[in-house]
Each structure stands twice: as C-alpha cells, then as structure tokens.
C-alpha cells in the first residue's frame, strides 16, 4: 500500500537521498532485530508491549477458529513485528527510488545490458543468500544473520554516497499527491507498450505459479524428499542466472517484442510439461527453462518500462509496475493453492500454463505494436 506514495516521493525529491535514508533505516531495523532476537536478552514487560501481544493474539484468533497454535507471551514479539514493518517500509521506498534512479546512471544504448547484469546479481542473491542464511542460523544464531544484514545495508549506504546526483529534472506543476498518483496510472494506461508488458507480467505469474506448488510435487508426485525439493527450488534461479549471462554476452536483440512474446509462450509450455512430468530430471530441466524464459522476459519488460517512461514520471510508473508485480506474485501463489486444492496440483499447473499461452495470444491481438518493437535502445521513445 506504500508503493504509490513511494513512487510519488521518488519523482518529487532526490532519489539518491531517498535511497540513503531508506538504507539507513533498513540498517537500524536489522541491527535492532539482532538485539531483540538475542536469546539472552530479557525484554521488560512494558504495558505497551503487553497491549501489543493482546492485539496480536486477537488478530490470530480471527484466523484460528479452534485453539490457537500461536503464543504471544514473549514481549519481543510486538517489537519484531514493528521492526519488520520498518524494514519493509524502508525497502519499499528504496525500491521505488532505485528503479527510477538506475536509468539516469546508465547510457541509453547500454541500459538493456545493465538490466541484464542487475537481474543476474539478483538471481545470485536469491540462491546464495538463503543458503548462507540457513547455514548461519543452523550453526550460529538468528542474531548473526541480522547483524550481517545490518552491515550490508550500511555498506550499501556508503556505496551510494559517491554516486553523483542525477541532472535536475524538469519542474512539473505543483499538484496534490492524489493527482500525482493518478498521473502515473494514466500514463501507464495511455502507453500500450507498457500496458502490454505489465499485462504479460501480471497474468503470466498469476497463472503460471508452478513454483508455489513445488513442495506438493516433491512429496506427492516425484517423491524426492527434502533434498529433491531443494534442487527444484534452485533450478529456476540457476536457469535465470545462466540465460542472463548469455543475454549479456550476445549483441542486443533485434526483435525484442517478438522475443518477449515467445519467451512468455515458452514459459507457459515449460510449465505445462513440468505439470505433466513424472521423471525427476525432466522436471528439473523444465524448471530450468521456466527460470530462463522468465529471466529474458523480465529483462525485456524492465527495459521497456524504464525507457518508455520520461524521467519525471519514472518513480510513479515504477510504483504502479511494482504493485502489479507484487499482486501477481502473491495472488499467483493463492490461485495455485486454491486450484490445487480443488482439482489437484497437476491440473492446477497445466491449466496455468495453458492460461499463460492464451494471455500471450490476447496481448498479440489487442496490442499488435508489441511485435514491432525492435532494438530496445533504438525503437523505444
């Protein structure tokens, strides 16, 4: 719910300063979480913490019709929720500022390649980060993980310091926040190329949420246990990282629009084949392709949104895009779970893959200009 205000601020104030402030609060929140989660720390029974526990207990009771499995006797629990809220808020504002600040640091003809490397680094973090964190939690403590996170956040703060501020943006007429947010949404709806890419992202992830059902496939269908599930979770990220390196090495795509549609189609086909597979190695191969196809489409979509959007609106448009991405991820997992409960995991995944392909056909029909996109740095204005 804070994405749109974050985008508004990113267009109104210095994005560099917003990033630095957000990273500072992120570091403080992580350091505080390290202190709160220290097992030898005794939290005093302050009345406000007692009220916080009572509130959380009441909220949990709404969702637990039978005897609650949650316990709110530890006075650190309200503090943990508060610090997680602060951390999430800082991350939201930092993301809106970073995504709109990034295009001002890279030449237009190199932007697609920069997005590729950015995606590669993200994929490395998504695989290596949880693995290292799990090892540290198992052999040291939760507090150590939070301390490392706080140090990394502060180091990022220091790395941002020497980056020069972006050139001054054109002064836009003063308008209230609500009208500013509406302007971002109107721009997205008026640019068919952006609308097409967001639609692909929204429905492809919403319908093709095979990764949400990986535990069911590992346990009930492939019978590979926890180790097999670990490999299944890793394969999409490995595929995404591998193809991102290849895209960075190859020359710019000459038919980016057609490549985008074919990649989302490939994503749907790989999802269908994964749903039908009963062979572990073949399922891993399909998950690799799911990650690879999704990575290329993410690179193209991210480049399109940033290059088509004028600098003075990048924060708000990025915020709108972030809302669609977040919505598709969360509701995609919900949709997969509901359809799996009603029809079984196989029909859920196969149906989602078919739906993804139908979405591609719809986008190609309703927004045919998407197919005409050539080199991203040459054809987008």
Image: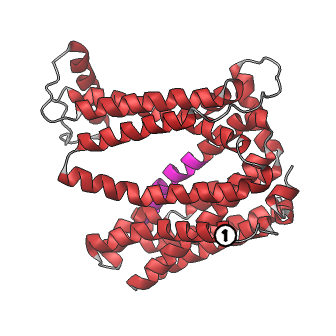
Please say if 263 is above or below 196: below
Q: Where does the image place residue 5, in percent across and percent down from the top left?
A: 61, 27
Give the main secondary structure, helix, strand or loop, of the magenta stretch: helix
Number of other residues with Cα within 10 Å of mark 1, as a class: few under 14, some 14 to 19, many 20 or more:
few
Q: Quadrant of residue 297?
A: bottom right
Please say if 107 is above or below 12: below
Q: Residue at x 66, y 59 (%)?
A: 299
Is 326 in the magenta?
A: yes
Q: Where does the image place residue 341, in percent across and percent down from the top left?
A: 39, 63
Which residue carries the number 1 mark? 249
* Screen quadrant of the N terminus: top right
Q: Residue at x 82, y 56 (%)?
A: 377
Q: Nearer the viewer, residue 210 or 254?
A: 254
Q: Residue at x 70, y 56 (%)?
A: 301
Q: Where does the image place residue 142, in percent across and percent down from the top left?
A: 24, 43
Count of marks overlaid on the render? 1
Q: Which residues are magenta?
A: 325-340
Left-right relation of 77 to 201:
left
Q: Nearer the viewer, residue 27 or 46?
A: 27
Q: Is residue 2 visible?
A: no
Q: Where does the image place residue 85, in percent across and percent down from the top left?
A: 41, 31
Q: Quadrant of residue 245?
A: bottom right
Please say if 263 is above or below 313: below
Left-right relation of 178 to 224:
right
Q: Residue at x 73, y 53 (%)?
A: 111
Q: Quadrant of residue 251?
A: bottom right
| Badge 1 element | helix
């Amino acid at each position: 719910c804070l994405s749109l205000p974050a985008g508004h601020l990113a267009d109104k104030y210095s994005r560099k300063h917003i990033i630095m402030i957000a990273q500072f609060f992120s570091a403080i929140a992580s350091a505080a979480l390290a202190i709160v989660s220290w097992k030898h720390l005794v939290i005093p029974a302050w009345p406000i913490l007692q009220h916080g526990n009572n509130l959380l207990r009441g909220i949990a009771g709404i969702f637990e019709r039978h005897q609650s499995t949650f316990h709110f006797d530890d006075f650190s629990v309200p503090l943990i929720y508060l610090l997680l809220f602060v951390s999430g808020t800082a991350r939201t504002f930092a993301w809106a500022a970073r995504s709109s600040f990034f295009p001002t640091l890279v030449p237009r003809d190199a932007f697609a390649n920069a997005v590729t490397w950015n995606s590669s680094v993200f994929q490395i973090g998504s695989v290596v980060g949880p693995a290292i964190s799990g090892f540290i939690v198992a052999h040291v403590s939760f507090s150590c993980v939070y301390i490392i996170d706080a140090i990394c956040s502060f180091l990022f703060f220091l790395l941002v310091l020497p980056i020069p501020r972006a050139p001054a943006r054109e002064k836009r007429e003063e308008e209230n926040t609500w009208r500013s947010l509406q302007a971002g949404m109107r721009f997205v709806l008026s640019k068919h190329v952006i609308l097409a890419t967001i639609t692909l992202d929204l429905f492809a992830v919403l319908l093709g949420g095979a990764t949400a059902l990986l535990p069911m496939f590992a346990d009930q269908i492939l019978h590979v246990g926890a180790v097999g599930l670990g490999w299944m979770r890793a394969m999409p990220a490995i595929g995404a990282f591998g193809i991102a390196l290849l895209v960075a090495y190859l020359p710019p795509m000459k038919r980016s629009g057609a490549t985008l549609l074919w990649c989302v189609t490939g994503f749907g086909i790989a999802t269908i084949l994964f749903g039908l597979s009963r062979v572990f190695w073949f399922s891993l191969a399909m998950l690799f392709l799911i990650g690879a196809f999704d990575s290329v489409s993410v690179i193209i979509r991210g480049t399109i949104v940033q290059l088509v959007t004028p600098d003075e609106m990048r924060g708000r448009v990025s915020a709108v895009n972030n809302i669609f991405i977040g919505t598709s991820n969360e509701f995609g997992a919900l949709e997969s779970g509901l359809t799996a409960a009603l029809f079984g995991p196989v029909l859920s995944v196969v149906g989602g893959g078919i739906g993804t392909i139908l979405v591609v056909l719809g986008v190609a029909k309703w927004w045919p200009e998407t197919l005409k996109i050539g080199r991203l740095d040459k054809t987008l204005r």
